[in-house]
Image (cartoon, helix red, strand yellow):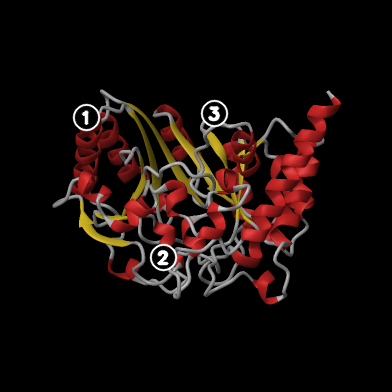
Amino acid sequence: MVPISSFVIKISSRCNLNCSYCYEYNMGDDSWKSMPKIMSIDVLTKVVDRIVEHSNKHDFNNISISLHGGEPLLVGIDKFEEYINVLKSNLQSHNYTIGIQTNATLINQNFINLFEDNDIFVGMSYDGPPEINDINRFYHNGKGSGKDVEQGLNLLTNSKIFSGILTVIDVNADPVNTWRYLSQFEPPIIDFLLPHANWDNPPTSHRENDYTKYGKWMISIFDDWFNGHKSHIRIRFFEEILYRLFGHKGSLESLGTEEVGLITISSNGAYEQVDTMKSVFPGAQNIGLNVIDNDLDEVLLQKGVKDRQLGISGLSTKCQNCKVVNICGGGYYPHRYSQINEFNNPSVYCEDLFMLITYIESKVILKLEKE
């Protein structure tokens, strides 16, 4: 098993938005209600102690930390500075990167200055033009967030710490219009995400008997990007498919058969195998261990964590016999679930992924043949 080197640390358990598709608050799991609103300094210090302990024991030196939520900026700038000081002082003998994932509604120049001074990279979530974004991403009073996000995004665009945009696909929105709108902000990376779904809670396209709607949506963007529009911007889903088509390893957990070395730590110090498991059923993320009582080697022994490190042998028979298994990897782990077979299924987006991967492969082969 590979050691854990990537950590999602949930410094805030609350959010100022109430996004309709949010796995944290709106997919049945309500564990956030009993969590501390922000992570204490004592708990964060113990988190870092466990990370350093694990790194030293397994002799690796590249550590990735994502400060997450809820909305992490809700902790306030003074507390955020305390967190940064704890991380930097305890990780100074290691190679590490620290990033945050924010909805960008609270970003201001003071936060930008703090993050620039400390090399904290900022990724933000935004689903497209305000009229598209606001369908699903709104405040608790129902007001759309798009215009506020635009203001934060304009600040980030001019900053060296801007790391990219996460976009949850709205399959009913125009794909090229969405991509071209986001690309005008010149993000280093755009990561288009499939909405969380599984075989017991399928995407709306399945209810319409359309099993390739998301694949076709992504292909429209791929063609525009591959044919030259803003092709310097990295679209991570495409990039990871291309890596694997040429026999290289990728880093995206939702594709490929590489062992997963990522864990989530909630604001009370509890380990979670990955927080997006909350989209599967309430409590699916829990492994019953915490940073106070348990080290990360104990985490590696838990079934849910071990299962995400099994590679091809942990996939369904259909996936193991599929020609794109080394690229698709069965799809994202939470998207495979059903009550009957648990995670022994292909992704609920199987046909979308197959269409997209084989299309990209054919386009690349055709381009190479012409050169």
Q: Is residue 8 visible?
A: no
Number of the label disc, if any, that sits on residue 278: 2
Horizontal side of 370 relative to 158 (left or right) equals right
Q: Residues within 10 Å of mark 1 (few under 14, many from 20)?
A: few
- Alpha carbon separation for disc pair 2 and 1: 31 Å
Residue 173: x and y, percent? 74, 61
Q: Are marks 2 and 3 in contact (CB under 8 Å)?
A: no
Q: Residues within 10 Å of mark 2 (few under 14, many from 20)?
A: many
Report helix, strand or loop for mark 2: helix
Q: Position of residue 91 (x, y in %)?
A: 27, 30
Q: What is the three-letter code of the residue carrying label 2?
A: Lys
Quadrant in the picture for residue 60: top left
* Residue in front for this viewpoint, 159 or 245: 245
Q: Which mark is residue 236?
A: none
N-terminal-most mark, 2 or 3: 3
Q: Mark 3 or 1 closer to N-term?
A: 1
Residue assigned mark 1: 56
- Distance between the Cα atoms at labels 2 and 3? 33 Å
Check disc 1 and give the amino acid type: Asn
